[in-house]
Amino acid sequence: GDFKYSVIVKAILAAGTSGYSIYPNPVTTNVINLVMTNQPAGKYKVQLTNAIGQVIFVKDIQTTGANSTHALSTGSKLITGVYQLEISGDDNNHDTQKVIVE
């Protein structure tokens, strides 16, 4: 039968989310589209590895910030399987996306 009031705090919610996504997924050609949402300007390294950790593709991307889409062409059609696309920026943050190839 007892109650207490807590301190009132102001919550500020971000206007947008940030991150990475890829399409199409599953991939059916040799092109993976990387969408960068609300990312800071700078240099990013993109690396695609197969299921046993072999590096298949590496590319450096320079962005001006905000939202951007980058077509990543691997040069030849990828073998059917599951791959990992790792994106790392100047700030040493890493993100990994699963890529399925049909």
Image (tube, helix red, strand yellow):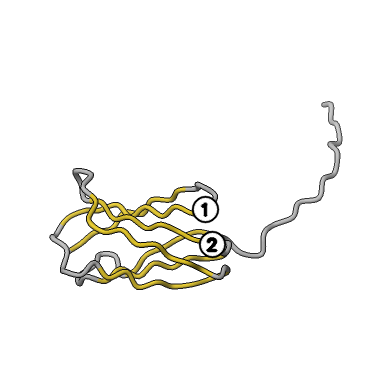
Can you tell which quarter of the image residue 27 is in? bottom left
What amino acid is found at the position of numbered circle 1 in the picture? Asp
Please, is residue 69 above or below residue 95 in the view? below
Left or right of 76 on screen, residue 62? right
Q: Which residue is mark 1?
A: 90
Quadrant of the rendering where the N terminus is positioned: top right
Q: How many marks?
A: 2
Q: Where on the picture, by quarter, is residue 75? A: bottom left
| Circles 2 and 1: CB atoms closer than 8 Å | yes
Q: How would you rate the neighbour count of disc 2 (Cα within 10 Å): few for under 14, some for 14-19, many for 20 or more?
A: few
Which residue matches tag 2? Answer: 42
Q: Residue at x 69, y 57 (%)?
A: 13
Q: Residue at coordinates 84% horizontally, 36% vertically from top-left? A: 6
Query: Front-most of 19 and 75?
Result: 75
User: Sequence-wise, which precedes: disc 2 or disc 1?
Assistant: 2
At 21% from the left and 50% from the top, the residue drawn is 50
Report the residue at 85% width, 31% height from top.
Answer: 4
Whether residue 41 sits left or right of residue 86 in the image: it is right
Depth check: 99 or 62 in front? Answer: 62
- Disc 2 to disc 1, C-alpha distance: 7 Å
Q: Nearer the viewer, residue 9 or 58?
A: 58
Callout 2 amino acid? Gly
Where residue 95 sits in the image (x, y, percent)? 43, 50
Crowd rating for badge 1 (residues with CA inside 10 Å; few <14, some 14–19, many 20+): few
